[in-house]
Image (tube, grey):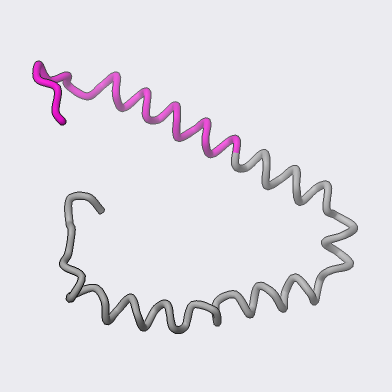
Amino acid sequence: MLCCKLPTRIVHPACTQLIKYLPLLFIAAGVGVLGYLDEIQTDFAAITSALLLGTLLSTAITLCMGLIIQRYLPKSDKQES
């Protein structure tokens, strides 16, 4: 995102249309939650555990990959700002 900044006048029309229809994406999720509310309540501990474990695992993998990439990338003499 930082390497490709676009002027607001170019991005604004597309963003306006996307934001206009964004609530439609949440309707299906809300209906799904209400439709399976009993199952969600029954398996709440398992769902919460899976979400937390998945978040921690993906964060740990991202951290490890970042460290591995930093180790193998050539180091420059100058510090970029």
| 16 or 59, nearer to the observer | 16
From what the image shows, is residue 16 above or below residue 59? below
| 54 or 30, nearer to the observer | 30
Image coordinates for residue 52, horizontal then vertical, percent: 67, 41
Determine the image quadrant of residue 20: bottom left
Determine the image quadrant of residue 30: bottom right
Residue at x 40%, y 30% (from the top left corner): 65
Q: Residue furthest left?
A: 78
Instruction: Find out whether residue 80 is within the magenta segment.
Output: yes
Residue at x 55%, y 77% (from the top left corner): 25
Please give the range of residues in magenta: 56-81
Q: Is residue 3 toward the left or the right of residue 15 in the image?
A: left
Residue at x 22%, y 24% (from the top left corner): 73
Q: Is residue 61 toward the left or the right of residue 67 in the image?
A: right
Image coordinates for residue 40, horizontal then vertical, percent: 82, 61
Image coordinates for residue 81, horizontal then vertical, percent: 16, 31
From what the image shows, is residue 12 above or below residue 46? below
Instruction: Find out whether residue 23 is within the magenta segment.
Output: no
Q: Is residue 5 toward the left or the right of residue 52 in the image?
A: left
Q: Is residue 6 toward the left or the right of residue 38 in the image?
A: left
